[in-house]
Amino acid sequence: MKDEILQKLITKTAKVLGVDESTLSGNTNIKTDIDLKSLEMAGIISELEEEYDCYIKYTELMHANTISEAAEIIAKQIEA
């Protein structure tokens, strides 16, 4: 599940930022490499919540540094 979510996060993040998906990876730092804003992240989370029919705690995602860490946090919340 984590790999699926990671790929979706990369795809959705690239779309939101208007960049090529190949420029992002699990190791991409959310805060320093791409400067993903909280409103942008909220939009991505909202799409994932609809897709997986769940609630994702945004406050827990604030601790993620990389896209991979964010995917892991989301996977744990979806599976719970």
Image (cartoon, rainbow, N blue to C red):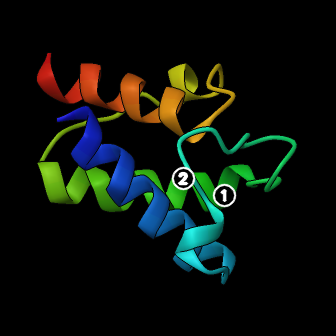
Q: Is the C-beta separation of discs 1 and 2 under 8 Å?
A: yes
Give the residue furthest to the right: 32
Quadrant containing the C terminus is top left
Q: Is 65 placed above or below 36 here?
A: above
Q: Is 57 placed above or below 5 here?
A: above
User: In the rendering, at what x and y percent does residue 48 appear?
Assistant: 30, 54
Identity of the residue drawn at 43% across and 54% down: 9
- Residue under label 1, please give it: 39
- Amino acid residing under circle 1: Leu
Identity of the residue drawn at 65% across and 19% down: 63
Element type at marker 1? Answer: helix
User: In the rendering, at what x and y percent does residue 27 appear?
Assistant: 62, 38
Question: Where residue 42 is drawn, which disc sits there?
Answer: 2
Element type at marker 2? Answer: helix
Q: Assess disc 2: are there few (<14), some (14-19) or many (≥20) residues with their C-alpha within 10 Å of its C-alpha.
A: few
Quadrant in the picture for residue 29: top right
Q: Assess disc 1: are there few (<14), some (14-19) or many (≥20) residues with their C-alpha within 10 Å of its C-alpha.
A: few
For the residues marked 1 and 2, what is the alpha-carbon distance in whole angstroms?
Answer: 5 Å
Quadrant in the picture for residue 22: bottom right
Identity of the residue drawn at 16% across and 35% down: 1
Identity of the residue drawn at 42% across and 50% down: 45
User: In the rendering, at what x and y percent does residue 28 appear?
Assistant: 67, 45
Judging depth in this view, the residue of 16 and 54 nearest the camera is: 16
- Amino acid residing under circle 2: Ala
Left or right relative to 13: residue 66: right
Q: Is 37 placed above or below 54 here?
A: below
User: In the rendering, at what x and y percent does residue 60 appear?
Assistant: 52, 20
Left or right relative to 46: residue 37: right
Give the residue furthest to the front: 22
